[in-house]
Structure formats: structure tokens, C-alpha cells
Image (cartoon, coloured by chain):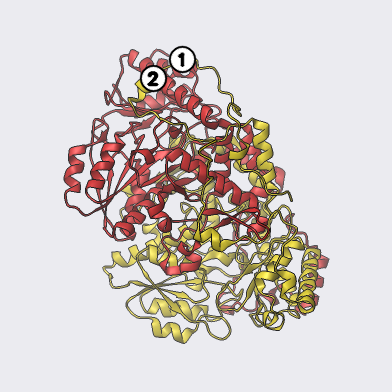
């Protein structure tokens, strides 16, 4: 990895250019006249650079990132599987990347067909009846799904349902999504096995509850054994059940949320369906629903009329919650997910989940002599290590372990999540890692634990040392925020 | 066996043996019998890479794309030129296949890119603080409306009918789900009707006014006056705009905007059938701690070296859970890297020159079309950028059909959404359109070709 780099603004030199436009081939106009005073007074201080400098700058930046293309990235709950290159080539085909979303339907039949088939395949994999591809991310999918739950209750004149139940082990987005759709989030406790406490749920369930949000397998990497009782409890109380697909990579071909009693779900195409994370996005949060919620899907909905594909718009769908994003969603991401599923087919999809689960159990067993596991029995695609005992014994925290892993050449697992496990280290190896990779990672974890016992926490405080920078002072960053480049006004 | 999975059959067998499991199914025994899937999903057969490429080519071939047809369609997505250097950078696996920068020591590339992007958005919008981006322009506007409602503790959001219809639909959805009220302002000569605005503001309960400029018709609004009006009524002023246009247009921050939002597709991102690109949102310091989404800040590491981190996370969902200002927990990162490369290549001069070419080419297009005698401007004496509304002497659907037959993607048909603009046609002209293409457009549209 390279060293810290100067910013674009430091690298900029007045007069340098990195572009060339063709000579203007029509009569020029006077900007001030044409814009009648709306013209910009001061030029924005954007960088002025030659193309070579721009390329070297961003290439240098890229080398300061760790990525799946570089190595093992066992970040729990994020499904950092390999992102196939054909998917990238597919999304860049001009027939996909160079089309306008408002072109006449007959000129974009291939794009509509691709989305139609992808929706169908996602519905089949999850056991749902209809899928929208409009939401741009997982959290956006949650919001969309909860809006449909809200609209469904409203359509029945049932306006007293203001609560969404969320397990205490849930991702932070769940309660946040509930509150941004106008619900109150209510927590339900986990039992000693880390599963939703069925009795606690029964006690919470009344006619003010709109629904339950559930991740299954849950954030401890285990399948809710009372899943049917959970969904039935909510249904009997008049609520709907939402499936957070964050962990769908564990169960493809093995169990379908639609068969477990879920009414609405989202999938993170950037997790389960191999589209790259891009350092934070773009992703896609496809949402699937059972037939009773289909009328509430965001518009437009892609439909097949004979051999043609078309759109049902908002005006033709009076019960739709409306639009949640412009146009059709992150289409380029959809092309990648389509390519992935078509490449794998049914056998490959099942194989992906099987290997994800095999790899997770293999690595969990390897590490179980170092850390207590937060689950008993088999895990699904991920597992949580309890870093509490090591911290208690040596003073070395899970954050220290994470930083030591960086020096060993790995991206660390997710730390301090789920909140119900002390010093949690959440590990998700995914199916695309080889046994050697898992073995070496286990050895690295062993070496770190040995170092902790031998040298104590002081030996960890300055880690990592192999990176361009070491641990940042986050307190100062928040207390005295510097959120943009400060130009030296005198220069 | 999948080519994306390294484990051989023998290795799988040995791993199962190590676990003391008889078969794969044993590992899934935690799934209750009743919900266990009996049959594999019904999906099409797997494809080898050559077969996959063929399948994709067939689908892509059923789309007519802007490499083959000159595109005069805009309405929120534009065919601007993108230098090859942009895709060269965003194709790098280090940017493409990394996660959100939660471990800053191994994500300085992404973090510094965000910090630089935030700076560029601040420079273009004239605002003090930008976040790391939003899903798109429409959701950015909706989040801004929510922010304004929470900040003013009022419930009513106003916007013009001349805000992009996609954005208005998303605003309505978000308002419904957040229990907010809204009102739509009519346009007068293609811009917000000031008299109507004054009347709607008179209630004193407006949280924010959302104004788009250049608006959906391409017209530039009188932001200063509109801002003064809404401020006078105690509301916030949200301006929705376009980053490329701000290379030539005055920064909304200088004209009274409290929140500036918009879509960033125009700077360095392909049309992609509408996504992905990104939305931006920028505010001034008073609203900093209410800003949704990721924000990157500068700090130092243990050795005093400049370091970038995600900051002000107390606002965000993974800390505040149900009390978070927004549930967004991603940014359109790769798309803002593309934008940053684009803006670095163009610089202030390139953006300005692009803006000037667009002004000239739009003016030329309108002139040529008017000369055919079949078109006239819908709005007179109003400045516009990149898009203009023309009224045609035939239904736009017929006109666009003829253009398509001649290999041209025509403009946006306004009448279904704006019935008063009979035969209204929204034509977009980017720097990518040549004189030859414009002449051909005018010839076909005028009936001479």
C-alpha cells in the first residue's frame, strides 16, 4: 500500500487541463446575455490537472484500499463474496449503459425483459409472488417494505397499528427504517440461544402492532427454530412479517422466506447476488411481496403483454405506495445480478449457499478453541465469536484484534455487532474462499491470541503499522469537524 | 461446479469430515423440517461465460442505445460525454470490490475520495457541508424535505409543479410515510408563480419550499426572490439543481439556499437506464448535525499524519437506531468516484466550456426548429439551460415516432403530465450533440427529411 497522498486541491496547478472538447460547430452565444444574470460570478475551485496526474492520483488512492480482489474479507453480515468480472463487462455494454430511462418502450425491450426475468428469478428463489427492483439499497428496501405494510393496514382502515417489533439482535437499520416510515420500533428480547423469545413476542403482540421485522438466519448466524410459530403469532395478531434479507446467502435453495410465513422481504443484490459494494454503493434492495401486498408495490411495475414488455404506471395502480426512487432503480446493478443468477443456475445457487455454510462451520470450528462461539450446534453462513474472555484475560479488545488482523493482511470481521454479544467478532467467510485461505486466517487469529497472552494490550495499541495511516483520532474528527478541503485564502 | 468456488469435491468431503458431518444436509439441520425446501429453485440452466455473453448481447441488442442514435431526451438524465479515464479508475477492483470504509486504515482511498467529493460539491453549490451522497436526486430532495420538517418542527412542504415529476412522486411517497403535508405550486410562464407562492406561504406553516433550477422545463428560477419569500415565512429554502449546470450557473448557496440537492448523473456517470448515478445534498453549519447519510472528515492518526474517517456518526442509524435522522447507511460511492474523476479532468474551465457549448447548441437547436415554422417556444423571455419547451403543431408522439424512424431519440412528451402544454416537447441538447445531428433533427422534425 502507498503512503498518504496530497489532495487533488494541493496537486492542482492553474492552467492545467485534463479534457478536450470539439471546437464549437454552431454560433457561440454570450453567456451573460443568455442567462440574464444567472451566470456564475466566481469559478468553483475544482482541481486543474492533466489526465496523467488525475490517473496517478486516483490510482494512488485506490492502492490505499483493501478489497475483495486483493484478499479475504470476512466482514460479517456484509457477504463480501467474489464479484465476477463478467458482471462488470455486462453492465458496461452500450445496450445497457447508454440507454435513457424515458425512451419509448419498444426501444428498450431488452432492458425491460432483463428486469422482468430477474424479478421472476428472485421471486422463485425467495418464494414470493412479486418483486420490485426500484429500491436503491438494503435500507431503502426496508423502508419500501414497511411503507407497503403501512399502506396495507391503512387500506383496511386499521389505523391504530403504529408499532413495528424488532429483535434486540437486529441491524440498526431495522429500527431506523421503522421510525422513518412513521412507526415506533419496539424491541423484543432474544432467548439464551440468541433466538427471538417466542413468549416475549406473544406478550408484545396486540392490535397496535403493524408487524415484525426479522433477519433469518439471525445476526448470530443461526436459523430461528420457531420461525413458523413466530410468523403465525404475528399473523394471528393481525400483523405482517418482514424478512430482512441481509443473510439470504445462507439459505438459497434450502428454505424460502415465502414458505416461512413472511409477507414482504428485501434482498441485498450487492451481498447475496455478487454485485460489488463499490466502497459503499451503489447497491440494490429488491423487495419481494406476497400476492396480498402486490397492489401496493411502487410504480411503475414491469409487465409482460404477450411477447412485449411494458409498464404499469402510477395512474394505473391506485393502491401503489407511489415511487421510492426515480426511474427503475439501480439498473446497472440489476444487470450484474441477472448475469450472476443466469451464470449459476439452480445448481450453482444452491451450491453457493452450501459452500457458504460449509466454509463458515469449518472456520468456526477452527477458531472455537480460541474464542467461545455465540451459538451452539451448526451455524449458517456466519458466526459470532465472543471476544469478552480474551479481553478479560489479556486486556486485548476485539478492536485490537481487528487492527492486528489488518497487519496480517486481512480485512477484519465486523466488530461490536451484534450488540447482544460482548466484544463481538462477526465472521462471514462466504463460499468463494478456499480452504487454504480459511486455514491461514485461523492461523493468523491464533498468532494474535498468542501475542495477546504473551505481550498484553500495549503491544496492540499502535497497530496497524503496515497501513498508510494508523488509528485515526475519531474524537477530534467529531468534535472539530473538518468536512471539506480548507483552501488557503491567501495563496 | 461453479467457477466462483475454489473448493473441490474432495476438499468439501474433507471439510465435512473435519466437522464430523455426514453430508451437507447435516449442516442445514437447524432449519425446521417443515420449512425445508424440497426441490431446487426453478431457474434457467447455468450458462458458461461464452453462452452468458451471447445471452447478454441478445438482450442488449433489443435496446436502441445512444451510441447509435443521437439522444435529445433529457428530463433528468442526460447524454454527456464521459472521458475514458473515468471508467479506467472506477473499474479498479480496489474501488469496486471494497466495502464501506468502516476500517479507516485500509480504506483511505475511499475516504479521501469522499472528502474530495464533498469539497467539490461545496464548491459547486456554494454550501459549507456536503455528505458522501444519496441514492439519487429524487430521494435527496425527499430527505431534504424531511430534514426541513424536523428542523422547523413544521409539517408542510411546498414544491413547484415544474419540479421533475419523478422527484415529485418520490416527495409525495416520503411525505405520506412521514405524515407530512404538501402543496404544489403552479407555474407561470414556465417558472414558479410568485403570487401563488405568497398565498400558500401566508399560512405560516411551511417547513420548506423545494425549487428546481434549472427546473423541469429547463428554465432558471429567480432563486434569490423565492428564497426571500420562503425565509420571510419562516421556512427553509431547498434548491434542487444539477452539478454540471453549476459550472456556469450561480451557486445556490449565494442565492439564499438552506439545502441544495440534486442528481449527479450529469457529471461522469452513464445514463444506465436511470441508475446507478448519485444524489447530492449540501447544507450550511446550522443543519450539519441533522444531515442524513455518511460524512467524511479529516483528522490525524497516532503519528500526526493526515487521516480521513467517517464522522458525526452520532446522527446515524447504527448508533442511534430508531432515533436516527434517516435510515440511509450507504452512499453511491463508486458513482461519486466517477464524478470526482470527471470533475478533476474537466476542472473549472472544462465545466464552463461545456456549459457554454450547451447554451450555444441549445440556442441553435431552438433556432433551427423555429425556422421550420412548426415549432414555437412555450415560454418567452426566460433564461434556460440545456432544455427548452417547444410547442409543436402535431402530437409529440407522432413527431417522436418519425424521429425514431429516422434514427433519432426525440424529446420528452409533456402533455400527459402537463395537459396545458398541448403538444409540449421538452428538448435536451448536451455538448455531445453535433451541428449535423441538430440539423438532421430539424429537417426530420420540420418534415423536410
Between B1 and B352, the one lying in front of the other is: B352
Residue A321 visible to the viewer: no
* Relative side of A441 to B31, left or right: right
Residue B211: x %, y % from top left: 32, 41
| Image hue for chain A | yellow
| Image hue for chain B | red
Residue at 56% across / 28% down in the picture?
B67
Residue at 53% across / 41% down in the picture?
A487
Residue A26, labelled with which disc?
A: 1
Residue B137, placed above or below residue A172? above
Residue B437: x %, y % from top left: 48, 19
Residue B38: x %, y % from top left: 61, 71
Disc 1 is attached to a residue of which chain? A
* Relative side of B257 to A404, left or right: left
Between B80 and A216, the one lying in front of the other is: B80
Residue that extends furthest to the front in the rendered view of this protein: A490
Between A364 and A27, the one lying in front of the other is: A27
Residue A216: x %, y % from top left: 55, 72
Asked where in the image residue B449 lies, by quadrant, the reply is top left
Between B299 and A97, the one lying in front of the other is: B299
Residue B281, placed above or below residue B391? below
Callout 1: few (<14), some (14-19), or many (20+) C-alpha neighbours within 10 Å?
some
Residue A76, placed above or below residue A90? below
* Relative side of A449 to B238, left or right: right
Number of callouts in the render?
2
Q: Secondary structure at mark 1?
A: loop
User: Which residue is disc 2 drawn over?
Assistant: B363
Marks 1 and 2: CB-CB under 8 Å?
yes
Amino acid at each position: 500500500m502507498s503512503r498518504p497522498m496530497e489532495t487533488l486541491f494541493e496537486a492542482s496547478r492553474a492552467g492545467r487541463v485534463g479534457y478536450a472538447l470539439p471546437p464549437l460547430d454552431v454560433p457561440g452565444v454570450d453567456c451573460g446575455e443568455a442567462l440574464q444574470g444567472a451566470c456564475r460570478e466566481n469559478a468553483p475551485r475544482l482541481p486543474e490537472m492533466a489526465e496523467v496526474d488525475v490517473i496517478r492520483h486516483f490510482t494512488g488512492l485506490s492502492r490505499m484500499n483493501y478489497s475483495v480482489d486483493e484478499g479475504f474479507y470476512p466482514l460479517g453480515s456484509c457477504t463480501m463474496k467474489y464479484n465476477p468480472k463478467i458482471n462488470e463487462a455486462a453492465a458496461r455494454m452500450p445496450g445497457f449503459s447508454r440507454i435513457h430511462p424515458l425512451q419509448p418502450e419498444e426501444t428498450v425491450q431488452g432492458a425491460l425483459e432483463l428486469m422482468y426475468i430477474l424479478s421472476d428469478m428472485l421471486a422463485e428463489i425467495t418464494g414470493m409472488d412479486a418483486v420490485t427492483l426500484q429500491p436503491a439499497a438494503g435500507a431503502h428496501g426496508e423502508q419500501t417494505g414497511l411503507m407497503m405494510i403501512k399502506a396495507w393496514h391503512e387500506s383496511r382502515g386499521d389505523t391504530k397499528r403504529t408499532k413495528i417489533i424488532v429483535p434486540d439482535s437486529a441491524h440498526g437499520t431495522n429500527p431506523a427504517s421503522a421510525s422513518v416510515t412513521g412507526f415506533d420500533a419496539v424491541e423484543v428480547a432474544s432467548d439464551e440461544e440468541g433466538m427471538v423469545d417466542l413468549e416475549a413476542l406473544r406478550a408484545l403482540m396486540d392490535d397496535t402492532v403493524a408487524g415484525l421485522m426479522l433477519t433469518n438466519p439471525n445476526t448470530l448466524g443461526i436459523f430461528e427454530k420457531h420461525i413458523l410459530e413466530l410468523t403465525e403469532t404475528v399473523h394471528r395478531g393481525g400483523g405482517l412479517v418482514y424478512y430482512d434479507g441481509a443473510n439470504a446467502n445462507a439459505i438459497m435453495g434450502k428454505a424460502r422466506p415465502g414458505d416461512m410465513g413472511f409477507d414482504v422481504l428485501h434482498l441485498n443484490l450487492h451481498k447475496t447476488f455478487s454485485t460489488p459494494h463499490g466502497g459503499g454503493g451503489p447497491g440494490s434492495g429488491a423487495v419481494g411481496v406476497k400476492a396480498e401486498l402486490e397492489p401496493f408495490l411502487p410504480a411503475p411495475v414491469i409487465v409482460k403483454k404477450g411477447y412485449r414488455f411494458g409498464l404499469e404506471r402510477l395512474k394505473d395502480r391506485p393502491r401503489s405506495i407511489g415511487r421510492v426512487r426515480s426511474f427503475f432503480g439501480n439498473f446497472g446493478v440489476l444487470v450484474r445480478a441477472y448475469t450472476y443468477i443466469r451464470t449459476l443456475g439452480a445448481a450453482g445457487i444452491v451450491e453457493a449457499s452450501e459452500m457458504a455454510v460449509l466454509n463458515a462451520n469449518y472456520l468456526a470450528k477452527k477458531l472455537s478453541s480460541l474464542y467461545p462461539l455465540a451459538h451452539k450446534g451448526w451455524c449458517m453462513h456466519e458466526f459470532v465469536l465472543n471476544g469478552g474472555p480474551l479481553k478479560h484475560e489479556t486486556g486485548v479488545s476485539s478492536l485490537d484484534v481487528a487492527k492486528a488482523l489488518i497487519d496480517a493482511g486481512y480485512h477484519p470481521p465486523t466488530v461490536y455487532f451484534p450488540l447482544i454479544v460482548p466484544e463481538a467478532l462477526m465472521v462471514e467467510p462466504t463460499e468463494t474462499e478456499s480452504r487454504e485461505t480459511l486455514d491461514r486466517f485461523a492461523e493468523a487469529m491464533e498468532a494474535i491470541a498468542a501475542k495477546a497472552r504473551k505481550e498484553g494490550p500495549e503491544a496492540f495499541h499502535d497497530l496497524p503499522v503496515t497501513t498508510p495511516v494508523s488509528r485515526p483520532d475519531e474524537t477530534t474528527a467529531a468534535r472539530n469537524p473538518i468536512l471539506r478541503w480548507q483552501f488557503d485564502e491567501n495563496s | 461446479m461453479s467457477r466462483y468456488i475454489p473448493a473441490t469435491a474432495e476438499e468439501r468431503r474433507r471439510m465435512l469430515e473435519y466437522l464430523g458431518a455426514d453430508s451437507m444436509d447435516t449442516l442445514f439441520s437447524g432449519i425446521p423440517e417443515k420449512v425445508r425446501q424440497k426441490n431446487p429453485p426453478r431457474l434457467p440452466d447455468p450458462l458458461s461465460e461464452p453462452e452468458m455473453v451471447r445471452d447478454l448481447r441478445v438482450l442488449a441488442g433489443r435496446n436502441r442505445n445512444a451510441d447509435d442514435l443521437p439522444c435529445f431526451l433529457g428530463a433528468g438524465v442526460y447524454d454527456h460525454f464521459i472521458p475514458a479515464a473515468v471508467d479506467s479508475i472506477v473499474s479498479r477492483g480496489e474501488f469496486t470490490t471494497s466495502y464501506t470504509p468502516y476500517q479507516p486504515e485500509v480504506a483511505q482511498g475511499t475516504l479521501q475520495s469522499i472528502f474530495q467529493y464533498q469539497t467539490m460539491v461545496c464548491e459547486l453549490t456554494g454550501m459549507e457541508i456536503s455528505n458522501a451522497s444519496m441514492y439519487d436526486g429524487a430521494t435527496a430532495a425527499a430527505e431534504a424535505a424531511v430534514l426541513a420538517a424536523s428542523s422547523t418542527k413544521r409539517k408542510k412542504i411546498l414544491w413547484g409543479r415544474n419540479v421533475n415529476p419523478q422527484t415529485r412522486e418520490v416527495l409525495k411517497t416520503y411525505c405520506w410515510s412521514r405524515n407530512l403535508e404538501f402543496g404544489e405550486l403552479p407555474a407561470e410562464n414556465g417558472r414558479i408563480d410568485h403570487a401563488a407562492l405568497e398565498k400558500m406561504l401566508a399560512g405560516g406553516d411551511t417547513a420548506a419550499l423545494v425549487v428546481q433550477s434549472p427546473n423541469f422545463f429547463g428554465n432558471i428560477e429567480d432563486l434569490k426572490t423565492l428564497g426571500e419569500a420562503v425565509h420571510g415565512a419562516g421556512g427553509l429554502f431547498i434548491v434542487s439543481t444539477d452539478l454540471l449546470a453549476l459550472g456556469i450557473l450561480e451557486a445556490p448557496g449565494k442565492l439564499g439556499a438552506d439545502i441544495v440537492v440534486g442528481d449527479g448523473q450529469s457529471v461522469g456517470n452513464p445514463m444506465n437506464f436511470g441508475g446507478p448515478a448519485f444524489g447530492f445534498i449540501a447544507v450550511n453549519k446550522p443543519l450539519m448535525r441533522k444531515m442524513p447519510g455518511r460524512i467524511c472528515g479529516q483528522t490525524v492518526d497516532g503519528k500526526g499524519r493526515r487521516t480521513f474517517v467517517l464522522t458525526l456518526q452520532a446522527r446515524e442509524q447504527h448508533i442511534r437506531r430508531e432515533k436516527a435522522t434517516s435510515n440511509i447507511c450507504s452512499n453511491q460511492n463508486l458513482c461519486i468516484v466517477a464524478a470526482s474523476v470527471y470533475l478533476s479532468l474537466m476542472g473549472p474551465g472544462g465545466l464552463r466550456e461545456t456549459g457554454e457549448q450547451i447554451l450555444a447548441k441549445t440556442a441553435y437547436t431552438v433556432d433551427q426548429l423555429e425556422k421550420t415554422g412548426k415549432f414555437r417556444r412555450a415560454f418567452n423571455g426566460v433564461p434556460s439551460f440545456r432544455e427548452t419547451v417547444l410547442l409543436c403543431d402535431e402530437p409529440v408522439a407522432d413527431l417522436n415516432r418519425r424521429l425514431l424512424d429516422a434514427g433519432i431519440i426525440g424529446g420528452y412528451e409533456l402533455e400527459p403530465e402537463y395537459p396545458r402544454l398541448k403538444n409540449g416537447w421538452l428538448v435536451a441538447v448536451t455538448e455531445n450533440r453535433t451541428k449535423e445531428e441538430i440539423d438532421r433533427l430539424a429537417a426530420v422534425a420540420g418534415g423536410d427529411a
